Image (cartoon, rainbow, N blue to C red):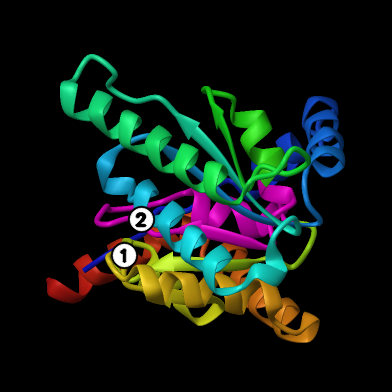
Amino acid sequence: KVYPISINVSDVQRIANSPRALDYEARLATDYSEINIVRIDRAEPNKNIVRGFKAYELLLSRHPELHGKVNFLAFLVPSRTHIRQYQRYMDDIQQVVNQVNGKFGTDDWQPIVTFIENNYTQAIAGMKLYDALLVNTIMEGMNLVAKEGPVVNTKHGVLILSQSSGVHHQLSKGALSVSPTDIEGTMEALYQAITMAPEDREHLSSLLVDTICREDINHWISSQLDDISALL
Protein backbone atom coordinates (compact mmCIF):
# COMPACT_ATOMS: atom_id res chain seq x y z
CA LYS A 1 0.00 0.00 0.00
CA VAL A 2 1.21 3.50 -0.79
CA TYR A 3 1.53 6.14 1.95
CA PRO A 4 2.59 9.43 0.30
CA ILE A 5 4.33 11.54 2.92
CA SER A 6 2.96 15.00 3.58
CA ILE A 7 4.57 18.43 3.60
CA ASN A 8 4.62 21.08 6.29
CA VAL A 9 2.09 23.42 4.69
CA SER A 10 2.74 26.37 7.01
CA ASP A 11 6.50 26.20 6.43
CA VAL A 12 6.11 26.12 2.64
CA GLN A 13 3.67 29.05 2.74
CA ARG A 14 6.01 30.99 5.03
CA ILE A 15 8.85 30.62 2.51
CA ALA A 16 6.49 31.61 -0.32
CA ASN A 17 5.66 34.87 1.46
CA SER A 18 9.21 35.71 2.53
CA PRO A 19 10.75 38.94 1.18
CA ARG A 20 13.18 36.96 -1.01
CA ALA A 21 10.38 34.88 -2.57
CA LEU A 22 8.23 37.96 -3.13
CA ASP A 23 11.13 39.61 -4.95
CA TYR A 24 11.57 36.57 -7.21
CA GLU A 25 7.81 36.45 -7.80
CA ALA A 26 7.68 40.10 -8.86
CA ARG A 27 10.55 39.64 -11.31
CA LEU A 28 9.09 36.46 -12.82
CA ALA A 29 5.65 38.04 -13.17
CA THR A 30 7.19 41.04 -14.95
CA ASP A 31 9.54 39.16 -17.25
CA TYR A 32 7.35 36.34 -18.57
CA SER A 33 3.97 35.68 -20.13
CA GLU A 34 0.65 36.07 -18.43
CA ILE A 35 0.11 32.30 -18.88
CA ASN A 36 2.79 30.02 -17.47
CA ILE A 37 3.42 26.29 -17.53
CA VAL A 38 5.85 25.42 -14.73
CA ARG A 39 7.88 22.41 -13.68
CA ILE A 40 10.32 21.97 -10.78
CA ASP A 41 12.58 18.92 -10.89
CA ARG A 42 15.98 17.46 -10.39
CA ALA A 43 17.49 16.96 -13.84
CA GLU A 44 17.17 13.17 -13.85
CA PRO A 45 15.89 10.78 -16.54
CA ASN A 46 12.99 9.47 -14.43
CA LYS A 47 11.60 13.01 -14.13
CA ASN A 48 10.67 12.83 -17.83
CA ILE A 49 11.63 16.42 -18.57
CA VAL A 50 12.32 15.92 -22.28
CA ARG A 51 8.88 14.45 -22.98
CA GLY A 52 7.31 17.36 -21.11
CA PHE A 53 9.07 19.83 -23.40
CA LYS A 54 8.08 17.80 -26.46
CA ALA A 55 4.44 17.96 -25.35
CA TYR A 56 4.78 21.75 -25.11
CA GLU A 57 6.38 21.82 -28.58
CA LEU A 58 3.38 19.91 -29.90
CA LEU A 59 1.06 22.37 -28.15
CA LEU A 60 2.70 25.31 -29.94
CA SER A 61 2.54 23.45 -33.26
CA ARG A 62 -1.17 22.68 -32.91
CA HIS A 63 -2.15 26.06 -31.44
CA PRO A 64 -0.27 28.94 -33.08
CA GLU A 65 -2.62 31.37 -31.34
CA LEU A 66 -0.66 30.62 -28.16
CA HIS A 67 2.65 31.87 -29.55
CA GLY A 68 3.96 34.72 -27.45
CA LYS A 69 1.30 34.10 -24.78
CA VAL A 70 2.40 30.93 -22.96
CA ASN A 71 5.81 30.40 -21.39
CA PHE A 72 7.22 27.15 -20.03
CA LEU A 73 9.31 27.98 -16.94
CA ALA A 74 11.50 25.05 -15.89
CA PHE A 75 13.33 25.17 -12.56
CA LEU A 76 15.86 22.34 -12.82
CA VAL A 77 18.42 21.27 -10.25
CA PRO A 78 21.55 19.57 -11.70
CA SER A 79 21.81 16.06 -10.28
CA ARG A 80 24.59 13.45 -10.11
CA THR A 81 26.61 15.33 -12.68
CA HIS A 82 29.55 12.93 -12.24
CA ILE A 83 27.49 10.11 -13.82
CA ARG A 84 27.66 10.00 -17.61
CA GLN A 85 24.02 9.02 -18.08
CA TYR A 86 22.93 12.11 -16.16
CA GLN A 87 25.34 14.29 -18.13
CA ARG A 88 23.82 12.98 -21.36
CA TYR A 89 20.31 13.61 -20.10
CA MET A 90 21.22 17.21 -19.30
CA ASP A 91 22.51 17.51 -22.87
CA ASP A 92 19.21 16.06 -24.14
CA ILE A 93 17.29 18.65 -22.13
CA GLN A 94 19.33 21.50 -23.56
CA GLN A 95 18.95 20.13 -27.07
CA VAL A 96 15.15 20.07 -26.94
CA VAL A 97 15.06 23.52 -25.32
CA ASN A 98 17.18 24.92 -28.15
CA GLN A 99 15.00 23.13 -30.69
CA VAL A 100 11.73 24.55 -29.36
CA ASN A 101 13.11 28.05 -28.84
CA GLY A 102 14.75 28.04 -32.26
CA LYS A 103 11.54 26.88 -33.94
CA PHE A 104 9.04 29.17 -32.23
CA GLY A 105 11.01 31.90 -30.46
CA THR A 106 11.27 35.52 -31.53
CA ASP A 107 13.39 38.47 -30.51
CA ASP A 108 10.73 39.31 -27.92
CA TRP A 109 9.70 35.85 -26.73
CA GLN A 110 11.50 32.64 -25.84
CA PRO A 111 8.99 29.80 -25.26
CA ILE A 112 11.06 27.76 -22.76
CA VAL A 113 12.97 29.47 -19.98
CA THR A 114 15.23 27.31 -17.82
CA PHE A 115 16.59 28.10 -14.37
CA ILE A 116 19.34 25.54 -13.84
CA GLU A 117 20.39 25.96 -10.23
CA ASN A 118 19.58 24.75 -6.75
CA ASN A 119 17.42 27.68 -5.62
CA TYR A 120 14.41 26.47 -3.65
CA THR A 121 13.05 29.94 -2.88
CA GLN A 122 13.06 30.88 -6.57
CA ALA A 123 11.29 27.62 -7.43
CA ILE A 124 8.65 28.32 -4.78
CA ALA A 125 8.11 31.76 -6.33
CA GLY A 126 7.64 30.06 -9.70
CA MET A 127 5.03 27.75 -8.20
CA LYS A 128 3.00 30.78 -7.15
CA LEU A 129 2.61 31.82 -10.80
CA TYR A 130 1.73 28.62 -12.62
CA ASP A 131 -1.42 28.16 -14.68
CA ALA A 132 -0.37 24.55 -15.26
CA LEU A 133 2.07 22.62 -13.07
CA LEU A 134 3.51 19.64 -14.93
CA VAL A 135 4.55 16.59 -12.88
CA ASN A 136 4.90 13.88 -15.54
CA THR A 137 7.43 11.68 -13.78
CA ILE A 138 7.97 8.18 -15.16
CA MET A 139 8.19 6.35 -11.83
CA GLU A 140 8.96 7.45 -8.30
CA GLY A 141 7.70 6.99 -4.79
CA MET A 142 6.81 10.58 -4.11
CA ASN A 143 6.88 14.04 -5.65
CA LEU A 144 6.61 16.86 -3.11
CA VAL A 145 6.24 19.49 -5.84
CA ALA A 146 2.73 18.13 -6.50
CA LYS A 147 1.83 19.11 -2.91
CA GLU A 148 3.91 22.27 -2.53
CA GLY A 149 2.57 23.90 -5.69
CA PRO A 150 -1.15 23.89 -4.90
CA VAL A 151 -0.73 25.33 -1.38
CA VAL A 152 1.25 28.39 -2.58
CA ASN A 153 -0.22 29.02 -6.05
CA THR A 154 -2.07 32.32 -6.44
CA LYS A 155 -3.88 31.64 -9.74
CA HIS A 156 -5.92 28.48 -9.07
CA GLY A 157 -3.45 26.75 -11.37
CA VAL A 158 -4.09 23.21 -12.61
CA LEU A 159 -1.91 20.24 -11.61
CA ILE A 160 -1.07 17.79 -14.40
CA LEU A 161 -0.01 14.59 -12.69
CA SER A 162 1.57 11.38 -13.90
CA GLN A 163 -0.45 8.23 -13.23
CA SER A 164 2.76 6.54 -12.10
CA SER A 165 3.58 9.08 -9.41
CA GLY A 166 3.28 7.74 -5.88
CA VAL A 167 0.97 10.61 -4.94
CA HIS A 168 -1.43 10.09 -7.87
CA HIS A 169 -4.07 8.10 -6.00
CA GLN A 170 -4.15 10.76 -3.28
CA LEU A 171 -4.44 13.83 -5.52
CA SER A 172 -6.01 12.52 -8.72
CA LYS A 173 -9.48 13.97 -8.02
CA GLY A 174 -8.03 17.46 -8.14
CA ALA A 175 -5.60 16.95 -11.03
CA LEU A 176 -5.50 16.11 -14.73
CA SER A 177 -3.99 12.63 -15.03
CA VAL A 178 -1.52 11.73 -17.79
CA SER A 179 0.48 8.70 -18.84
CA PRO A 180 4.15 9.72 -18.61
CA THR A 181 5.01 8.29 -22.04
CA ASP A 182 2.00 9.83 -23.84
CA ILE A 183 3.24 13.08 -25.40
CA GLU A 184 -0.03 13.67 -27.25
CA GLY A 185 -2.07 13.13 -24.09
CA THR A 186 0.21 15.41 -22.10
CA MET A 187 -0.16 18.11 -24.76
CA GLU A 188 -3.95 17.81 -24.53
CA ALA A 189 -3.79 18.10 -20.73
CA LEU A 190 -1.64 21.22 -21.01
CA TYR A 191 -4.14 22.80 -23.40
CA GLN A 192 -7.05 21.81 -21.18
CA ALA A 193 -5.32 23.31 -18.14
CA ILE A 194 -4.53 26.71 -19.65
CA THR A 195 -7.96 27.09 -21.30
CA MET A 196 -10.07 25.77 -18.41
CA ALA A 197 -12.93 27.92 -17.13
CA PRO A 198 -12.00 29.88 -13.97
CA GLU A 199 -14.68 28.19 -11.87
CA ASP A 200 -13.40 24.73 -12.86
CA ARG A 201 -9.81 25.72 -12.04
CA GLU A 202 -10.92 26.99 -8.66
CA HIS A 203 -12.82 23.77 -7.95
CA LEU A 204 -9.83 21.54 -8.74
CA SER A 205 -7.49 23.80 -6.79
CA SER A 206 -9.77 23.68 -3.75
CA LEU A 207 -9.88 19.89 -3.87
CA LEU A 208 -6.09 19.70 -3.91
CA VAL A 209 -5.53 22.19 -1.10
CA ASP A 210 -8.17 20.54 1.08
CA THR A 211 -6.63 17.09 0.60
CA ILE A 212 -3.06 18.26 1.17
CA CYS A 213 -3.95 20.19 4.34
CA ARG A 214 -6.28 17.52 5.73
CA GLU A 215 -4.04 14.54 5.05
CA ASP A 216 -1.10 16.00 6.93
CA ILE A 217 1.88 14.34 8.60
CA ASN A 218 -0.31 13.14 11.50
CA HIS A 219 -2.69 11.50 9.04
CA TRP A 220 0.30 9.93 7.27
CA ILE A 221 1.62 8.14 10.35
CA SER A 222 -1.76 7.30 11.90
CA SER A 223 -2.99 5.63 8.68
CA GLN A 224 0.04 3.34 8.75
CA LEU A 225 -0.41 2.51 12.42
CA ASP A 226 -4.11 1.80 11.85
CA ASP A 227 -3.31 -0.60 9.02
CA ILE A 228 -0.66 -2.36 11.12
CA SER A 229 -3.14 -2.74 13.97
CA ALA A 230 -5.70 -4.24 11.61
CA LEU A 231 -3.21 -7.01 10.76
CA LEU A 232 -2.67 -8.02 14.39
Q: Is residue 27 above or below residue 200?
A: above
Q: Quadrant of the N terminus?
A: bottom left
In the picture, measured across the screen, residue 220 lies left or right of residue 67, that is: left
The part of the image, by quadrant, that contains residue 139 is: bottom left
Residue wearing tag 1: 180
| Crowd class of label 2 (few under 14; some 14 to 19; many from 20; radius 10 Å) | many
Residue at the extreme top: 82
Which image quarter: residue 35? bottom right
Of tags 1 and 2, which is closer to the observer? 2
Look at mark 2 in the image and give the residue it sits on: 51
- In three-dimensional space, the C-alpha distance between marks 1 and 2, rounded to whole angstroms, equals 8 Å
Asked if the magenta segment contains residue 166, the reply would be: no
Q: Is residue 152 above or below residue 177?
A: above
Q: Position of residue 19 (x, y in %)?
A: 85, 27
Residue 33 sits above or below residue 126 on the image: below
Q: Indicate the secondary structure of the residue bearing disc 2.
A: helix
Task: Give the class, few, some or many, for how many residues have Cα within 10 Å of label 1's Cα (few <14, many ≥20).
Answer: many
Identify the residue at horizontal 50%, vertical 82% (top origin): 173
116 relative to 81 in the view: left or right: right
Q: What kind of residue is marked 1?
A: Pro
Which mark, residue 58?
A: none
Nearest to the observer: residue 183 or residue 137: 183
Magenta segment boundaries in residue numbering: 127-153
Which residue occupies 56% across, 77% down?
A: 174
Q: Secondary structure at mark 1?
A: loop
Q: Are marks 1 and 2 in contact (CB under 8 Å)?
A: yes
The amino acid type found where label 2 is placed reads Arg
So how many labels did they put on this image? Answer: 2
x and y percent of residue 144 in the render?
Answer: 47, 49
